[in-house]
Image: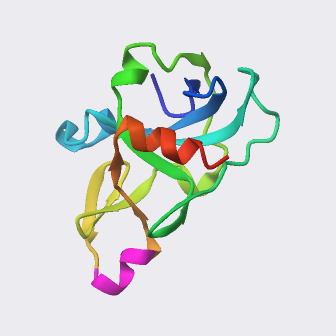
Amino acid sequence: MQAGDIFYIPMEDGRFAISQVIWLGAESKEQKFKKIFAFAVLSIGNDQKIPEDQNYLVFSDHRGEFKVIFTAVDHLKAGEWPILQRGVVSDASLRGLEFNMAGTLYRGGNPVRVLDIDEYQDHILMGVSGFALVERFLQQH
């Protein structure tokens, strides 16, 4: 597995979420986040066809809109979310993913600096979603 890999998530309603690995936590310093990965969704539909359009779907929760979802790597590693092909992260702003985790800014899983409170909203928040919550996000489309 590597950043850029395109995979699908079988959804409870029979559809498929074609998704792309944005970042693997195993890349983090001292493998602090080794059991987590981040992905974005390219499309949701009735087949496993990779869309030509590489724009990521937008989801929402109580914090607002987001494109990147963090979850456990288990289903990906076990093949329950099969990889369809290798790829590259097309959104330049997501390469070397930066995120806020507990007030610290991380780049590629490595700590950069402590954020001022007023900077929190400027960065993707790492909120690790369980698989049931991932399904709920996917059902928004």
Q: Which of 8 and 35 is in front in this view?
A: 8
Residue under the image location 69 percent in, 36 percent down: 44
On screen, residue 56 versus residue 74, left or right, reads right
On screen, residue 100 versus residue 68, left or right, reads left
**Residue 137 vertical position relative to residue 31 in the rendered view, above or below:** below
Residue 58 sits in quarter = bottom right
**Any part of residue 37 in sight:** no
Residue 127 sits in quarter = bottom left
Q: Which colour scheme is used?
A: rainbow
User: Residue 34 at what x, y percent from top left?
Assistant: 25, 34
Residue under the image location 61 percent in, 41 percent down: 41
User: Residue 85 at what x, y percent from top left?
Assistant: 63, 19
On screen, residue 85 versus residue 35, left or right, reads right
**Residue 91 vertical position relative to residue 21 in the rendered view, above or below:** below
Q: Would residue 120 be counted in the magenta stretch? A: yes
Q: Which of 66 and 118 is in front in this view?
A: 66
Residue under the image location 67 percent in, 44 percent down: 90
**Residue 126 vertical position relative to residue 138 in the rendered view, above or below:** below
**Residue 18 vertical position relative to residue 83 in the rendered view, above or below:** below
Residue under the image location 39 percent in, 35 percent down: 131
Q: Main secondary structure of the magenta part?
A: helix
On screen, residue 116 versus residue 136, left or right, reads left
Residue range of the region highlighted in magenta in the rendering: 116-121
Residue at the outermost top position = 79
